[in-house]
Amino acid sequence: MRIVRGAPGTGKTALVFREFKAALARGREPRIVVPTATLVRHFQHELARDGVICRPRSVMSLARFVAELAGEDCKLAPPALTRSLVRASLQLLDLPAFAEAAKTDGMAAVVEETITLFENAGCSPERLAARALAPRAKAFARVWAAVDKDLRAAGYCSRLVQFRTAIARPLPMDLWFDGFLHFSQLEVELLEALGDVGRVVLTASAGGDETLFDERTEGVPRRPRMVEVAADSVEREADDIARRILELQAAGTPFREIGVAVRDAAVYEPLLQGVFERFGIPARFYFSRRLTGHPAATFVGGLLDCALKGWEHREALRALRADPRFGLSAAFDRFEFEVQQRLPDRGANELLKIAALEGMGDYKKRLADCTAIQHWPEESLRPADWSRRVTQLAEKLFLPGRIQPAASFADVDNARSQTAGLRAFIEAVTEVAGLWPAERGLITLAEFWAVARAAVREGSYRVPDDRRDVVHVLSSYEARQWDVSALFVCGMTNRDYPKRSSQNLLFPDTEIDALRRVGIPLRRTSELEEDEDKLWAELRCRARSLLIATWPRHDAGGRTVEASRYLAGRDEPGTAAICILRGPDAGPADAPGSARGATPAEGDGADHA
């Protein structure tokens, strides 16, 4: 195994690409392995721009690479199933150490996070249970063992088992691992196994105490011009980012050469989406969307809730309003008005009587299809049969209808989201069927939907976007490996840069130190905080020409916010300019950055870089 070291921006990825191309020219089948699926796509595009022809699987994420090595007989448990098993184990075991917290979603999240922590350290539940542990640690070990047992009974495996299987099946290959901040103990074991049978090259930041052979890149770290911009609020910050993007585009920088790194996606993603649409800036957002708010989940899930609760009319209206074919029709408006006049009321037959009134059009037949499930709560089926029945219901009823010619990309995105959300909903209800062992037998709809509802609530989906010339809006972790001309790092506050890591609630650092002494290499809080410095060092050199760090002086509540310590002592901050939207006479309505673009007010703040 060979480690290529170097400071961020010194050419490690360029070296990987050169060696990868040389291996292809020799007729071999090399692989580049990266941490995320987003980076896979970025690397594939970079190679394509260089004229490199290779198989899609030549660049793949670590998760997919491990799954390929482990084989189909070692299938990783879906996240929704694992979460459901954690909740079920917490409730069934009723451990005094967790008391009432065991029934909360927060406790389930802590247990799931801790399981990942131990799996990354290469520790199994059996090995942990053999140690002398504090009461909360013992309770966790029991929950973990129960979850692991249930996963095996359902025909799935944990991440630890999948890695162990892959480690036992190494194949001789030419491999390059690039883009990783660090490798966990489990990943190191895999690298060593692969290095014993093939050629393995991995990139790493300068420093560290590994004893393996090192090769240092001789390139000079990239240092783009840096501008610091303070805004009065996050809204002004987003406006200023949009204005500067339009200025860069007007100066000759393509949209695809501009990136925006986001740390707090919950705040910045919806804000930037609205601002970019208003300013006519095409952008691709590399974030998953919550399934719980999708019309498919609201509509189909709402019908199942109505069937279980006796078709309470107020709840029925909420579900039926998400009907993609009739929710916005005049017939439904009339139906909703009539139902509102009779509230509070309940019952599927009463809804059908209202739909039979004059002026409802063919809504009665549509409602009859929706209420046909009213007898389902009286039946008992196998979990797989319930999953199949709910899937058929979703495919039959959630039909958006004929797709009209799109007037803008927003229409295209909306149409694609219908299919993506429906597919994610079906996947969620299909995956949870494995929660119940085969010997469990028949269950009711209430039992099945209680678990499937939680899976849907935590599910997510992504809408495909294959546009070429767009601004890339992605997480800071993923942006650190992209190569763009200009990069915006927004939200550069002291809260998010660096993001402070709290100690694990079940295993504080004192207990982690004790476990490390017996050979379980868990990561301490201080090591997680070191990753924050590495993250900023990577982001600092991602842009070839310009790095713009922006931050708001006040948060959404009007409270004063401190700038990140990474910005202290750097270039003198600029001021976010006031953006004035230009009128319709400024250019064609659909021209990016013209009709809906913005210009700074005369005499307003300028950069000091």
Image: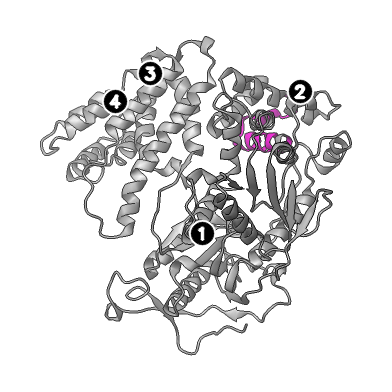
> Main structural element of the magenta stretch: helix, strand or loop?
helix
Question: Label 4, on which residue?
Answer: 347
Q: Mark 2 or 1, which is nearer the eye?
A: 1
* C-beta proximity under 8 Å, tags 4 and 2: no
Residue located 81% across and 54% down the image: 208
Residue 246 drawn above or below residue 510? below
Q: Mark 4 or 1, which is nearer the eye?
A: 1
* Residue 132: quadrant of the picture: top right
Q: Mark 1 falls on what kind of element? A: helix
Is residue 110 shown in magenta? yes
* Residue 489: quadrant of the picture: bottom right
Question: Label 3, on which residue?
Answer: 377
Image quarter in which the C terminus is found: bottom right
Which comes before the other along the chain, label 2 or label 1? Answer: 1
Q: In the drawing, what numbered circle is on residue 46?
A: 1
Q: Mark 2 falls on what kind of element? A: helix
Q: Residue furthest left?
A: 358
Is residue 27 shown in magenta? no
Magenta span of residues: 95-118
